[in-house]
Amino acid sequence: MEEIDGLREGARLKARIRELEQLNQLKDAEFNNFMRNAPWGIFLARCTAQDSISSARVYYVNPVLTNMFNSLDLINQPLLSPEFWVNSVERSRFLEELTKSYQISGLTVQLRDRDRNIFWGKIFARVIPSPEGIFIFGCIVDVTVEKGDEPIQRKPISYS
């Protein structure tokens, strides 16, 4: 009798695990949908635990950030690439604040897209240590219009 109860309990546990796995897949899909459709440019950068934050490379970008920088080639680019930062002082301030407090909340800087157009971005970011290395999760909001400049007219990038 105990053996049958044990088999039933094992079957119930296996069914519950399957339910949780399906729920997890659904939540992953919802999260990915949120990331793709967020109204701000989202990025994830990464460096090894032995490296400094200054060596972080872009690991993920959403379509809004891709359009903001007018480039499909952002993955594996240095987060602090001078190609995208107009002002080296602002780039240094970003690095200093991120290194000191492990987060940035609304730093407004001038950035440059692939076609060398300059726009204003407000950056929010946080350092997230993990066993796989150091991640920097952040978003950039285009505040060009709020700064009184004309918005850059970009055509949406095709992902096909």
Image (spheres, rainbow, N blue to C red):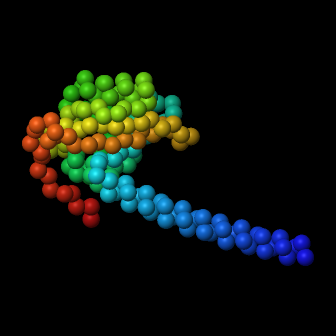
| Residue 61 location (% of width, % of height) | 34, 49
Residue found at the very far right of the displayed protein: 1
Quadrant occupied by the N terminus? bottom right
Q: Which residue is drawn at 22% across and 46% down?
A: 69
Q: Which residue is more in the foreground, 5 or 47?
A: 5
From where the camera sits, is residue 84 visible? no
Rendering quarter of residue 80: top left
Q: Which residue is drawn at 10% across and 38% down?
A: 149
Q: In this picture, is 140 found above or below 154? A: above
Q: In this picture, is 16 found above or below 72? A: below
| Residue 119 location (% of width, % of height) | 17, 39
Q: Residue at x 19, y 57 (%)?
A: 156
Residue found at the very far front of the displayed protein: 146
78 left or right of 146 in image: right
Quadrant occupied by the C terminus? bottom left
143 left or right of 3 in image: left
109 left or right of 150 in image: right
| Residue 67 location (% of width, % of height) | 22, 51
From where the camera sits, is residue 110 visible? yes
Rendering quarter of residue 6: bottom right
Q: Residue at x 38, y 49 (%)?
A: 60
What number of labels is visible?
Answer: 0
| Residue 93 location (% of width, % of height) | 31, 24
